[in-house]
Amino acid sequence: MLGRVSGAAVLVAGFGLVGVPASAAVAVPCDTAALVREVADSTGQLSLAPDCTYVLDEPVGENGFAVITGSLTLTGRGTTIKRDPRAPRFRIFQVAQGGALTLDGITVTGGHTADGSAPGASGVGGGAVLNAGRLLVTRSTVAGNRTGDGAPAARAAAGQDGSTGGDGGDGGAVLDTGTLVVRQSVLEDNATGRGGRGGDGGADRSAGGGEGGDGGRGGMGGAIASSGDASVVGSTVAGNRTGRGGAGGHGAAGGTSTTGDGGRGGKAGPGGAGGDAGGIGSSGVLTLVDTTVARNTTGDGGRSGDAGVGGRGVRGGAGGGIRGGREARVGGHGGDGGGLAVFADGAVTLERATITDNRTGDGGAGGHGGDGGAPDGLAGSGAVGGSGGAGGGVELGNGPTNPVVVISGGRISGNRTGRGADGGPSGRGGSDLRQGYGGSGGSGGGGGGVHVSKKRSLHLVDLDVVDNVTGTAGEPGRSRATGGGPGSPGARGSGGGVGVSWYLPDPPTTVLENVRLRGNEPDQCSFVPCS
């Protein structure tokens, strides 16, 4: 039987501290069915049973509960809400636009959204909570939730190019498009889904082979992915991770001709990028105060596909794979922003944050070039190795020069960027200026502590940037062609402490004021004065 609890001052969905009359809070016994009914029927406050674990074993649509459209507060003490791991996949909560949910003293765990449901479809986002309204998480833990993988793409029809694999779902714990406040809480061990494999190109008996499709990207935001207004205060975001990128599809073999040239082999599909933002990803407004972001990781890039072989003919068709320029294929880029990544136009403020021991993903390996067709086809060049993810602690991606990103107080230490991947070997056969070469190695990720991309402006004020390290370079692929040569080695990432990159004529403004840089490798700063 449900009862009423005594009045108290509690946090409610308006995110203020207000008095709750004795008749307003409904006590819910340690009974999952009762909790499901009350969430569907109630607004106001529900007081959950102390030290109780409510286990959800069947979904309500895509969620554990009915969609929240009003204002609801759940309070607990040592109380857990979890999805039964044997149950179908679903997230725990969904907050509609105009709705509001407060979680106070609750652990939310076990949410797992669905994989992409059709070839090339993306995984479902928001492993624990999908929020389009207002969400307050206070004195709570959101842990062990996961989003779905992107689905692999289907094989292409004859002579057609492969399609792109699906992306992993975003927001391992929370996918937010509304207003999110996390206060005195822990978000840990959440993960986003992997990208799906690109589709293989379709072979045509009398023409060139189809190109492989791109691998899908890993899901963004191991704990939080927000395009709304997000604030994280006095909390810990630790041990979260994003999914790896999907492998690129293989190029198809060129067709055979008895009277002319054999068909060219199809190019390999590029690998998908690893998911950005191991801990928190924002393309909106982000405020982070007195919070620790630690031991989060982004996904590795996916391997590129292998190029197709050239077809047999009076003259052999060239193997797939072109050296240099836009036609070259590449392994996937490691995910950026081991701790957090910020994109787009929103204001960003980090105050007294500790960002430590985060890591970005390695690049995906380059696949091999296709063999030339008999009797004398040119060999295809190998694919370029993918670059390691940038911004071991913080990645400030493409955005405006105004508003300025401000990081003040705190510590950024012990973060690492990913390694560049090795280039792929060429195919076998002849060579010319662009055919028959190994792929170049990928570069290590830049900005071991902080990486600033083009046009974004940053002020670093009164903080320690210590013992951060950039990733090493990938090795060049070898040539297996007559007269060919290896690719070029990659470059190690620069800016062990702070790395800046831009495209002139739009350099960002990066200002360091009372910033203590030491022990960063291979250098303290790149493209910005260290003092």
Image (tube, rainbow, N blue to C red):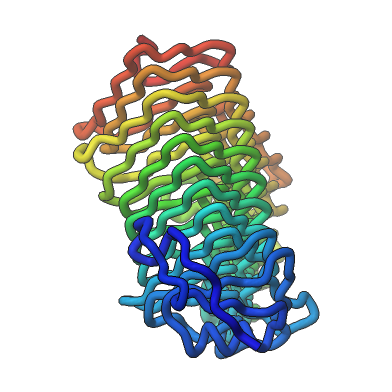
Relative to residue 102, is residue 436 depicted above or below?
A: above
Q: Position of residue 350 (x, y in %)?
A: 39, 35
Query: Residue 239: x percent and y percent?
Result: 66, 46
Judging depth in this view, the residue of 8 and 300 nearest the camera is 8
Classify residue 466 as left or right of residue 485. Answer: left
Occupied quadrant, residue 445: top right
Q: x and y percent of residue 202 in the render? A: 60, 80
x and y percent of residue 424 in the render? 67, 47
Quadrant where the C terminus is found in the figure: top left
The residue under the point 33% across, 64% down is: 14
450 is higher (above) or lower (below) than 63: above
Q: Quadrant of residue 34?
A: bottom right
Q: Residue at x 41, y 71 (%)?
A: 21
Q: Which quadrant holds residue 229?
A: bottom left
Q: Extreme right residue here?
A: 86
Front in this rendered view, residue 17 or 508: 17
* Position above or below: 425 against 5: above
Which residue does the image show at 48% across and 18% down from the upper left? 464
Decide if residue 377 is in sight here: no
- Tell me what residue is drawn at x 33 percent, y 45 percent: 398
Residue 401 seen by the camera = yes
- Figure quadrant of the N terminus: bottom right
